[in-house]
Structures are given as C-alpha cells and as structure tokens.
Image (cartoon, grey):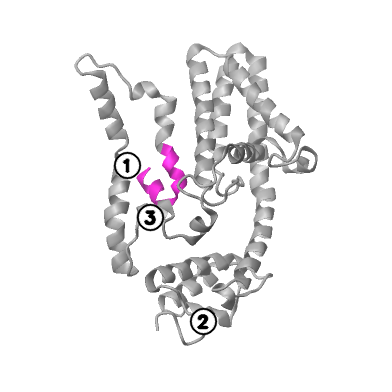
C-alpha cells in the first residue's frame, strides 16, 4: 500500500478493502482487553502504511525535491489545489464538482464498460444519455442484489459487503475525479473498477452456487460475460477514444501559450527514444529548444509536465524565450 500511495492517489482507497470485507479481523473480542483497545491496536497496525506515507510525503519528499529540483513540494497545498489556477477558476474546492448528478453519471460511466459492449453503444446509449442504457445498468444492479440473497449467511455477507465496497469505490472515484476529469471515462481514471466488479461477481457466483449446478453455470456465464466486455473495451474502444483525445489535446496545447512553441506531427508515434531525448533536453536546461523538431502527440504530455515543473522552480517563463535562450539561462 505504501508503494501504491506514492504512485497514484487512486491507491488511497486500498486500505478500506480488507476492513469492509472482513470486519471481524479488526473488531475482535478479547477477554484480556477492552474491545476498544483491541480494535484500535488492530487498526493502528493495519494503517501503518498510511501513517508512514503521510510522514514521508510531508517531511521527506520536500527535502528530496529541494535538493533535486530546487523547490519544496507541498502535499497539503497540492491536495487542496491552493496554487492550481484551474482549481480556482473552476471553483472546485476540496470535493471538486461532486454533486448528485455527477455521482449518478460516474456510477453509469464506471459500470457501463463492464456490462455494455461498445458495439451496442449506438443502440443503448452511453454515459446516462439513454433511458434504455440506464435501465439496463439498473437491472444489472438489482439482479446482483437478488443473487447475493441466494447463498448461505456467510456467502450473503461477503457478497453484500463486496457490493458495498463497489459502491464506495464509485463514490471515491466520483469525489477524486470531481477535481479533475469530473466524469471518469473508465480507461485510466476509472480503470480500477474492474477489480471490484470482478470481486463482486466472484462472490455472487459463490452465493448462487448454493442453489445447484445449473444456477452455478448460469452465474459463471454471467461473470465471464462482463469480463469479456471489459477486456474488449480496453483493447479496442478505449484505445480508439484515447487516440482521438490525444489529437484534441495536441490541438489545445499547441494553440495555447505557453506551449505554442511545440510542433506536433500527427502521424508520428511516440517512442522511448523520443521521450528520453525530451528528458535529456530538459535536464540540460534546453526544454524550449525542442521546438526545433516535430514531436509526437503522445510525448506532448511529458513536455507539459516538465514545463510545469520548471514553472514551479523558476516562476513564470517569458513567452519570447526560444532556441539558445533557455529557461535556466
């Protein structure tokens, strides 16, 4: 968990998985201790990675960024969006643009890639824009709750807890992405939904298996179908959408200051060599000189992040700097 926290904020949800699925492992009665003390000790040990991460990001990371990049990383201000003009202009606040409407749209956007094949999108709709598609997803949820009731007490508890976990992840994703993408697209920001959908389906299969081999076979088929749909979306539909998004982002970046110096070759594919060249130009203080060559749309994101990093370190960069007049000069 500690490593995951340092890679992506989506990992912040991970500590909730075990306590929700297996609460008895944390709230345990011990005749030698008070219930509250035992529970507190269990939670303290389990959440040590969270405490270590907070200590690391609040005290150690600023030392690293100060020595390496010349600025102090402020985790709290970053989370609150204190120095992000986009956050202020959009009036996001701490919870972002989370509203009942965006929560509902995120609910559909996260579940649809698992239950609606992209080939049926023209007929069922997408993203809450079709009553048919919305009714379909609603039927799937109702069916899942009904199947969860079929098993033994233990199986029912696990199945319902997995559905609660799935719902909490949708709420978490809607809150987290309300500060950025607003409505998740199921490709990057919402990709972890597949983990919780698969977990719920597996436990629903276990619950349904108590009714005999025939119902178990039906449940297995129902479990395999969403997995196949999700894979198909990942391989084809979402990759195609990202290609279009890349081209759109390239247009936006290329036409906007301060990245107007970048030249985009729409036909060029991003490569490791190109990204390495951009990185080395930035290390040498020559980031703006990449405007002398055409780059791929995919590498534009690296340029944008490095440019923003230099802004943190050096402040606003004059718009006329080109060629040998580098940032660091």
Q: Secondary structure at mark 3?
A: helix
Q: Nearer the viewer, mark 2 or mark 3?
A: 3
Q: Which residue is mark 3?
A: 77
**Where in the figure is residue 316, as x and y percent of width and height?**
44, 74
Crowdedness near tag 3: few (<14), some (14–19) or many (≥20) residues, C-alpha within 10 Å? few
Q: Which residues are magenta?
A: 1-14
Q: Earlier in the sequence, mark 3 or mark 1?
A: 1
- Pick the front one: 120 or 102: 102
Q: Which residue is at 30% across, 31% downward?
A: 43
**Where in the figure is residue 55, as x and y percent of width and height?**
27, 49
The CA span between labels 3 and 1 is 22 Å
Quadrant for the C terminus in the image = bottom left
Q: Which residue is mark 1?
A: 49
Q: Earlier in the sequence, mark 2 or mark 1?
A: 1
**Considering only vertical position in the picture, is 241 above or below 277?**
above
Q: Which residue is at 52% across, 79% downward?
A: 319
Disc ID at residue 289: 2
Q: Which residue is at 29% across, 51% downward?
A: 56
Q: Which residue is at 52% across, 12% downward?
A: 152
Crowdedness near tag 1: few (<14), some (14–19) or many (≥20) residues, C-alpha within 10 Å? some
């Amino acid at each position: 968990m500690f490593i995951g926290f340092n890679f992506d904020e989506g990992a912040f949800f991970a500590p909730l998985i075990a306590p929700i699925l297996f609460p008895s492992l944390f709230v345990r009665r011990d005749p030698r201790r008070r219930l509250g003390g035992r529970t507190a000790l269990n939670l303290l040990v389990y959440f040590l990675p969270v405490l270590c991460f907070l200590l690391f990001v609040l005290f150690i990371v600023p030392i690293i960024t100060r020595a390496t990049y010349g600025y102090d990383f402020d985790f709290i201000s970053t989370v609150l969006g204190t120095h992000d003009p986009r956050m202020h202009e959009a009036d996001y606040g701490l919870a972002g643009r989370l509203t009942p409407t965006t929560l509902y749209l995120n609910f559909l956007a996260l579940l649809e890639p698992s239950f609606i094949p992209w080939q049926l999108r023209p007929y069922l709709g997408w993203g809450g824009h079709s009553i048919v598609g919305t009714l379909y997803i609603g039927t799937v949820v109702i069916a899942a709750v009904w199947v969860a009731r079929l098993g033994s007490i233990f199986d029912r508890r696990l199945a319902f807890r997995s559905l609660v976990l799935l719902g909490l992840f949708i709420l978490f994703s809607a809150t987290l992405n309300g500060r950025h993408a607003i409505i998740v697209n199921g490709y990057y920001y919402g990709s972890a939904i597949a983990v919780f959908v698969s977990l719920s389906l597996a436990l629903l299969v276990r619950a349904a298996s108590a009714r005999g081999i025939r119902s178990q076979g039906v449940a297995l088929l129902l479990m395999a179908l969403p997995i196949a749909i999700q894979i198909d979306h990942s391989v084809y539909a979402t990759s195609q959408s990202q290609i279009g998004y890349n081209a759109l982002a390239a247009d936006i970046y290329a036409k906007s200051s301060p990245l107007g110096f970048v030249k985009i070759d729409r036909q060029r594919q991003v490569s490791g060599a190109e990204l390495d060249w951009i990185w080395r130009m930035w290390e040498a203080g020559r980031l703006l000189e990449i405007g002398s060559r055409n780059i791929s749309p995919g590498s534009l994101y690296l340029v944008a992040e490095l440019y923003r990093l230099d802004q943190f370190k050096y402040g606003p960069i004059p718009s006329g700097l080109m060629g040998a007049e580098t940032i660091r000069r």
